[in-house]
Image (tube, rainbow, N blue to C red):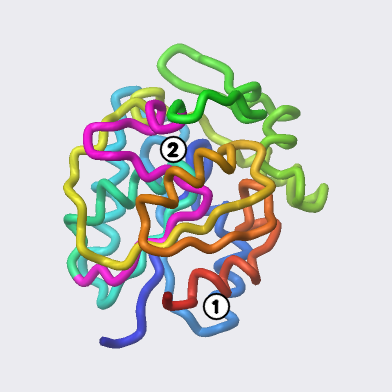
Amino acid sequence: MGDSTYVLVHGAWGGAWSWRDVGRELSRRSVAFIVVNLPSSTRGAEPTTSLADDALAVSAVAQDLGPVVLVGHSYGGAVITEAAASVENLERLVYVAAFVPNLGQSVTEASREVPVRTLLDEAIEVDGEYLRLNPERSTAALYHDCDDETARWAVSMHSTQTTKSLRGARSAPEVDVVSQYVSCQNDRAVDPEIQKLMAARCRFRTNLLSGHTPQLSQPIQLCDVMLSRP
């Protein structure tokens, strides 16, 4: 097989922007990558925009590529799980502090497998059929180990998230490819105990001493892990 292309999938309220520093590092290493903007996190998204729509966006981007590694952060883990069966030439799945829902399970349901409330829960605000993040509280939940400038920039980039996307159940079957879980040990958004359960659904696990968003706080270390082949 030739060189792999890494398809980077962000989490809820995020965008392609969240992979800025990882993209710079991958470019420095001459690694091919594509960053996806998920429809459910797009400003002005229809409230019906779902997990299935996000998965379709990922599979469409990956359709004509050679060997593909899907990388999903947080909610993006559910997206790559849903998209995997429809991606030809899929080589590997990498989950970063991510949800790996079981068949028939939503991200919301997966997040409740361990009954613990996080700082991210405190930051979420309901706005009709959308969810928003409180700026001050989301900083503490998502970017506590980033420098102040990066944290302020990231918070300014947040979008809304359709409620439907987080409540949509996984419908895609398992795929027989290598799966790797990157557990963020200082995470204040997705509790490490939840991550331990999600990691058990993957073949390999790696730990990072980072908060929820290592692509901004530890991009070099995250790239080291992503590019390793277990």
Q: Within 10 angstroms of label 1, few (less than 14), some, or many (20 or more) residues?
A: few
**Where, quadrant-wise, is the N terminus in this rendering?**
bottom left
Residue furthest to the bottom: 2
Q: Which image quarter: residue 66?
A: bottom left
Q: Position of residue 161 (x, y in %)?
A: 46, 30
In the rendered view, would you say 90 is above or below 82? below
Residue, disc 1 = 27
Residue, disc 2 = 42
**Left or right of residue 155: residue 62:** left
Instruction: Give residue 193's mark.
Output: none
**Left or right of residue 203: residue 140:** right
In the rendered view, would you say 230 is above or below 109? below
Residue visible at 30% across and 36% down?
51
Q: Amino acid at mark 2?
A: Thr
Residue visible at 43% across and 53% down?
72
Which stretch appears magenta?
Answer: 89-111
- Of the two numbered discs 1 and 2 on the same chain, state the one appearing first in sequence: 1
Q: Position of residue 183 (x, y in %)?
A: 55, 54
**Marks 1 and 2, Cα distance to the nearest angstrom?**
25 Å
Q: Which image quarter: residue 102?
A: top left
Q: Within 10 angstroms of label 2, few (less than 14), some, or many (20 or more) residues?
A: some
- Is residue 190 found inside the magenta-colored segment of the image? no
Residue visible at 49% across and 29% down?
114
The secondary structure type at the circle numbered 1 is helix
Residue furthest to the right: 148
In the rendered view, would you say 123 is above or below 181? above
In the rendered view, would you say 42 is above or below 22? above
Q: Position of residue 75 (x, y in %)?
A: 44, 41
The secondary structure type at the circle numbered 2 is loop
**Where, quadrant-wise, is the C terminus in this rendering?**
bottom left
State how many labels appear: 2
